[in-house]
Image (cartoon, helix red, strand yellow):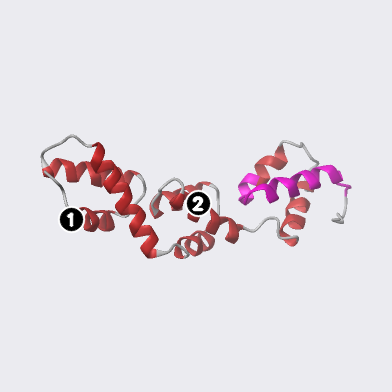
């Protein structure tokens, strides 16, 4: 049980926040936004955040790693889009870079190849240059790095 200084924080709020953080990894911004819904007295939310960190319910380094890994595997996002999403969640730069560095390079390249291959099957263009341009634009829109996208496209075997 957490012990809070100064004003008494309702235990049910703290328990609710522990549950919220235990359900899935949360960013600091997610937790602060959720805490605002309880309309606590000034400073109480910071006390709760300190306790959540102390008890390892809130960890932004862990959040960045899990977020990056999930967005790649589930949403098929590239590093650029993941970086931007983590910045929007106000995750510190150090943790963002740490999370992105945890990504397996071979798996990442494999996902990019699958994204390009899947999109290629949907394209109707016969003109190879237009087809490549559309594939590159699509992969860039998913957040993959331009140089990597073009390397994959240029090695890709297009069937007539």
Q: Position of residue 95 (x, y in %)?
A: 54, 61
- For the point 60% across and 57% down, the residue is 60
The image quadrant where one finds the N terminus is: bottom right
User: First in sequence: mark 2 or mark 1?
Assistant: 2
Left or right, 73 with respect to 125, comes to right
Circle 1 residue:
154
Q: Relative to residue 141, is residue 65 depicted above or below?
A: below
Q: Main secondary structure of the magenta part?
A: helix
Q: Nearer the viewer, residue 7 or 154?
A: 154
Q: Is residue 12 magenta?
A: yes
Q: Nearer the viewer, residue 25 or 157?
A: 157
Q: Which mark is residue 124?
A: none
**The furthest residue to the front:** 159
Magenta highlight range:
7-30
Q: Position of residue 45 (x, y in %)?
A: 75, 47
- For the point 40% across and 55% down, the residue is 79
Q: Nearer the viewer, residue 141 or 75?
A: 75
Please, what secondary structure does the residue beneath circle 2 have?
helix
Q: Position of residue 118 (x, y in %)?
A: 29, 44
Left or right, 43 with respect to 63, comes to right
Q: Mark 2, residues whose alpha carbon is within 10 Å: few (<14), some, or many (≥20)?
A: some
Circle 2 residue:
70
The image quadrant where one finds the C terminus is: top left
Left or right, 129 with respect to 106, comes to left
Q: Is residue 17 magenta?
A: yes
Q: Mark 1, residues whose alpha carbon is within 10 Å: few (<14), some, or many (≥20)?
A: few
- For the point 75% across and 60% down, the residue is 55
Q: Nearer the viewer, residue 114 or 35?
A: 114
Please, what secondary structure does the residue beneath circle 1 have?
helix
Left or right, 13 with respect to 33, comes to right
Quadrant assignment, res 33: top right
């Amino acid at each position: 049980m957490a012990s809070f200084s100064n004003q008494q924080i309702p235990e049910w709020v703290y328990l609710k926040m522990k549950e919220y953080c235990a359900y899935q990894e949360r960013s600091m911004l997610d937790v602060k936004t959720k805490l605002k819904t309880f309309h606590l007295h000034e400073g109480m939310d910071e006390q709760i955040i300190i306790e959540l960190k102390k008890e390892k319910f809130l960890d932004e380094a862990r959040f960045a790693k899990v977020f990056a890994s999930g967005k790649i595997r589930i949403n098929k996002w590239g590093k650029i889009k993941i970086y931007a999403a983590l910045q929007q969640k106000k995750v510190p730069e150090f943790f963002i870079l740490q999370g992105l560095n945890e990504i397996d390079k071979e798996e990442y390249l494999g996902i990019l190849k699958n994204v390009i291959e899947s999109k290629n099957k949907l394209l109707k263009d016969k003109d190879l240059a237009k087809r490549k341009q559309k594939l590159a634009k699509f992969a860039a829109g998913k957040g993959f790095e331009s140089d990597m996208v073009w390397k994959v496209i240029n090695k890709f075997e297009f069937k007539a």
